[in-house]
Image (cartoon, grey):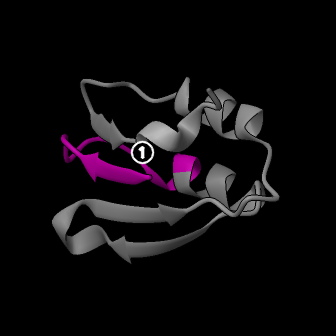
Amino acid sequence: MWLMRLSLKNEIGRLLDLLKNAGCSLVDLGQYGCYAIDIPPKVPIYKIDQIVDLVNTDEVAVAFPSMRHEE
């Protein structure tokens, strides 16, 4: 998953902490406002859905691969 900070006032740290605590790892390009999140197969997708639901889409853009949901 990829995140992009759209607003300088956004505090994305809490969101990143939640993702790390869920078992994800990340590459932080914070100086550019970009973050790459690795979601291992062992992490239940519902946990990620709960975290993504917290995102204010006016402040953070989210790109999530289409394989997010099973057919």
Taking 12 as reference, is 19 left or right? right
Q: In front: 42, or 10? A: 42
Please give the name of the residue rendered at 74% of the width and 31% of the height, measured from the top-left corner: 46
What residue sits 31% from the left and 25% below the top? Answer: 57
Can you name the residue that lies furthest to the front here?
71
Total number of numbered discs in the rendering: 1
Mark 1 Cα shell of 10 Å, populated few (<14), some (14-19), many (≥20): few
Quadrant where the C terminus sits is top right
> Is residue 65 in the magenta section?
no
Give the magenta range: 1-15
Question: In which image quadrant can residue 56 be found?
Answer: top left
Q: Amino acid at mark 1?
A: Pro
Residue 37 in the image, given as x and y percentages of width and height: 49, 62
On the image, the x and y values in percent for residue 25 come to 61, 71
Q: Which corner quadrant of the image does residue 70 belong to? A: top right
Residue name at image x 71 percent, y 39 percent: 45
44 up-or-down from 20: above or below: above
Residue 49 in the image: above or below residue 4: above
Q: Is residue 10 magenta?
A: yes
Q: Residue 52 or 30: which is nearer the viewer?
A: 52
Can you say whether 66 is above or below 2 in the image?
above
Q: Position of residue 44 (x, y in %)?
A: 80, 43
Q: Is residue 11 left or right of residue 7?
A: right
Secondary element type, mark 1? loop
On the image, numbered disc 1 is attached to which residue?
Answer: 65
